[in-house]
Image (cartoon, coloured by chain):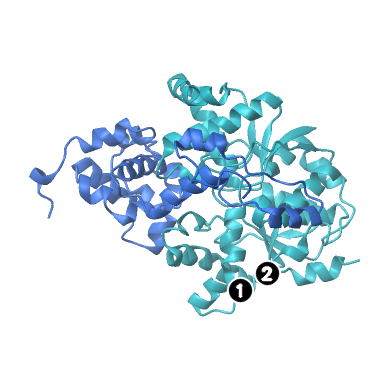
Chain colours: A cyan, B blue
Amino acid sequence: MKALLFLGCTVPVRNLNYELSARQVCEALGVELVDDPELACCGYPLKGSDQAHALVIAARALAQARAHCLPLVALCSACAGTLAEAEHHLSHDPEAAAMVNQELEPLGLTYEPGVRVTHLVRYLISEVGLEAIKAKMTQSLEGFSFAPHYGCHYLKPAEVIGGLDDPENPQSLAQLIEATGATAVNHPRLKDCCGGGVLGADEELAGAMAGAKLAELNELGVTAMVMVCPFCNVMYEGQQKAIAKRMDLKLKVPVVYLTQLLGLGLGLSPDQVGLKLNRVKPKELIKAFKE
Amino acid sequence: MVRLNDCDPGFKHQVAAEPGGEGIRMCFGCAACSARCPVGANRPEYDPRRIIRSTLLGRREEVLASPLIWLCSSCYSCSEVCPQGVRFTDVLTAIKNLAAREGHAPPSARVTAELLAKQGRLLEVTEFENDKRADLGLPPVEQRPSDFQAILGIEPEAGEGEGA
């Protein structure tokens, strides 16, 4: 199995624990990830104010990916969503594709439909398969409980992303958590939006959105929250202290990436999956698995 | 009070002509979007149905100049529950794009474009970042901004063409 890795802007600079564990997990599961230094921004940050240029930037990445003849897998849900939406839009709208190609021509690139865009976690489920992943586990995480955070762009819009999860009743992350032997926690705010999309415009509003879920999980007392997106991570891990201060709460909700959990289950050490780099550390997990 | 004489009946057509804006034609005002909106749950003055209604009425300036339109978290909850296929997230993107063209975008929008033209990515990558990556055995990442400058039509600032 071989896939082209879309690292995006945030993960390779701010979330090395995610990248490290994702690469390790892929290696352990027999997935070869190919890097291409030309792949950088997906266009998402520009969409709100300038969707025409955002689409050209996404199409640029799709045109580059197509040359590799490999599925394009992203670690960030916003990248995966933006690129999948662009592929969906351009492959259904020849006029938009022609406009985009006019802009790409001076760069020596041509967009053509046919790139399969997906999130790394969805790729692992569809290509490696849940049972095969479970069969490779060598270290049980039994006794730990994790709250999966699906976020929005991992699931929606369903007409573009859909197929694996029902956005009203998502299961895939819980199934992967359970594949490690751990318990996946269901709770009322399971499907909450992290608020990351409005952090730039209104920090207090974004914090209130993430804070409600953090407060609920703080009460429940889980081993950690489980992320698949660096933007959600900014809210729940990066902003956790600021949110606790604003809400006047003592919050201590450890946050991990799903690939870090899978890595532990596959027999890797806390250091190998970058748990040292987590800011709200899952101390019981590190203690249980340190060499 | 809304005076119809002050409204612009062409505004809704302008929104519908933007990519993603066409869905506004389908709205029958049920407010499923508003009921489901996680931003509205925390900030009641942000109300998707109200934004649609104001747009349909032609309250052009009120809509385009409103800071509220920039509060969408783009979670797509509204799009999923809409019985009419309006896709409010996309309609609002169309409205925000119109607003940006008339100078109403928050300053961060311009900064984002400039960062992409300068770095080819949102976050800067220097030797410092690549040293940290190398310590973990991760391959280096690069800044290749030239395509982004061409797409966005932004020239790099003098003296910043090399190194960085």
Q: Nearer the viewer, residue A29 or A277?
A: A277
Badge 1: how crowded within 10 Å, few (<14), some, or many (20+)?
A: few
| Residue occupied by mark 1 | A219
**Relative image position of residue A35 (x, y in whole percent):** 73, 38
| Of marks 2 and 1, the one in the foreground | 2
Residue identified by numbered label 2: A280
Counting from the top left corner in percent of width and height, residue B98 is at 31, 41
**Side of A100 relative to A10 (left or right):** left
In percent of width and height, residue A100 lies at 48, 26
Label 1 secondary element: helix
Q: Which one is nearer the viewer's eye here, A101 or A196? A: A101
* Cβ atoms at labels 2 and 1 below 8 Å apart: no
- Residue type marked 2: Val
Q: Amino acid at mark 1?
A: Glu
The residue under the point 86% across, 65% down is A289
Left or right: residue A260 versus residue A148 is: right
Count neighbours of disc 2 (C-alpha within 10 A) and say few if under 14, some if 14 to 19, many if 20 or more.
some
Quadrant including the C terminus of chain A: bottom right
